[in-house]
């Protein structure tokens, strides 16, 4: 969910999931000195230059390369590619666009591209590779298909994908940190092609022999609650009910579900209605209809589901530094259920949790007819 800032109870329902985080800064008292010289002596200057943010787990920021350029071969560019400000249509939470057959055909292409790009990134995961190198793969694979990497410059985001390791819930910015054998990693890829976005993410275990069983179980529970929620999708059902399915499943197994970030409608706009909350709620976010497209992307935690935002204003980490996992598909509501527009294809990596799932074994290809 590449949205700026958390959901808050004081926000209107219409504004949720489209917040641009603003930091409230305490105004200095009248006559107070400004800048590093404010205070008493050299010690105060040193203190003002010392970082005060406390990182909660094992992951800290490393150096970043510059944003990667976009060639002229890309078929179409999103509204924010230069300005960083996306066009956001004004809609009430229950007002949801129904895609035309032409729209759906284009979304299938965008979704297929996103899947192929995510597969390429996932195949590169290994100890020692940096997340910046993974970003380079995502960027190259995207533009080689004449598509645009949707995260790039969205509200100023500096990279072409999100890479969230261990305690990072979402929006991790790729950098020079090498992956460690014991890491678990989410790669979130969105591709914009011919006017439409396709959005998906997946977990990867860097070294299956080094990641502990608790880390594997976290990925398994997250995967299973996600599939269970997707199995529920069918015309006439309420979007609000998705959250209870997820929360009931994970809490009964000792995990928590993040409340600050959500799934979303998607199409020609990256993030739109409906808002998909991954916890029990009564929000009037509409009823599923044929032609709706949206994401389900639960973020499940070993410990607290509360987060802190890094000074980069993007990276969200668990407050207690414990690990978190996430999966995501772009879904299309059909007559009999739904299908993933970012579903796995021949040649996609089969993951351990797909083989061991108690909800659905093998690649999940949709809930139609179930």
Image: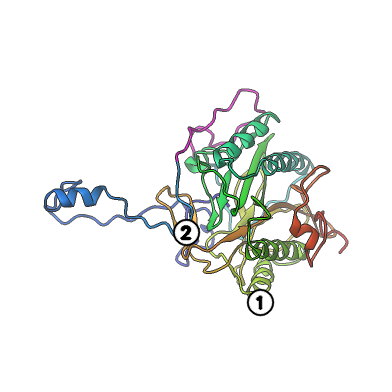
Residue 229: give x, y in percent of width and height: 72, 64
- What range of the chain is rendered magenta? 63-84
Give percent across and percent down for residue 246. Answer: 67, 68
Residue drawn where x is 82% and y is 56% of the image:
362
The vertical placement of 73 against 257, above or below, is: above
Q: Residue at x 13, y 54 (%)?
A: 30
Residue that badge 2 annotates: 57
**Mark 1 to mark 2: distance in Å?**
25 Å
Image position, residue 240 (x, y; %) = 65, 67
**Residue 289 in sight in this render:** no
Q: Which of the two labelled residues, at mark 1 and mark 2, occupies the earlier sequence position?
A: 2
Image point (43%, 49%), residue name: 313
Is 34 placed left or right of 92 in the picture?
Answer: left
For disc 1, the marked residue is: 252
Give the quarter of the figure containing the C terminus: bottom right
Q: Is 256 within the magenta?
A: no
């Amino acid at each position: 969910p590449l949205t700026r800032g958390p959901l808050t109870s004081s926000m209107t329902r219409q504004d949720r999931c489209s917040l641009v985080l603003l930091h409230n800064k305490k105004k200095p008292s009248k006559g107070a000195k400004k800048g590093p010289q404010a205070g008493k002596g050299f010690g105060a200057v040193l203190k003002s230059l010392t970082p005060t943010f406390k990182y909660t787990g094992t992951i800290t920021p490393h150096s970043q390369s510059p944003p990667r350029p976009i060639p002229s071969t890309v078929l179409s560019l999103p509204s924010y590619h230069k300005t960083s400000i996306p066009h956001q249509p004004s809609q009430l939470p229950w007002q949801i666009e129904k895609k035309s057959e032409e729209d759906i055909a284009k979304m299938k292409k965008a979704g297929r591209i996103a899947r192929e790009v995510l597969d390429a990134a996932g195949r590169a995961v290994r100890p020692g590779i940096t997340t910046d190198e993974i970003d380079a793969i995502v960027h190259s694979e995207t533009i080689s298909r004449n598509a645009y990497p949707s995260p790039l410059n969205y509200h100023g985001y500096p990279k072409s994908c999100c890479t969230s390791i261990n305690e990072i819930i979402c929006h991790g910015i790729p950098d020079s940190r090498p992956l460690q054998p014991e890491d678990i990693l989410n790669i979130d890829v969105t591709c914009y092609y011919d006017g439409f976005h396709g959005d998906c993410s997946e977990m990867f275990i860097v070294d299956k022999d080094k990641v502990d069983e608790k880390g594997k179980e976290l990925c398994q529970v997250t995967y299973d609650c996600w599939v269970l929620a997707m199995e529920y999708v069918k015309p006439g059902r309420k979007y609000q009910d998705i959250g209870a399915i997820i929360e009931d499943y994970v809490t009964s197994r000792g995990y928590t579900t993040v409340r600050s970030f959500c799934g979303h409608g998607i199409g020609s706009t990256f993030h739109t209605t409906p808002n998909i909350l991954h916890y029990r709620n009564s929000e009037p976010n509409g009823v599923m209809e044929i032609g709706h497209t949206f994401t389900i992307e639960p973020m499940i935690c070993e410990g607290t589901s509360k987060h802190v935002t890094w000074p980069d204003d993007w990276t969200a980490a668990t407050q207690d530094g414990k690990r978190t996992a996430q999966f995501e598909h772009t879904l299309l509501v059909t007559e009999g259920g739904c299908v993933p527009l970012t579903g796995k294809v021949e040649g996609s990596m089969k993951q351990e949790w797909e083989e061991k799932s108690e909800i659905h074994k093998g690649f999940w290809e949709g809930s139609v007819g179930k």
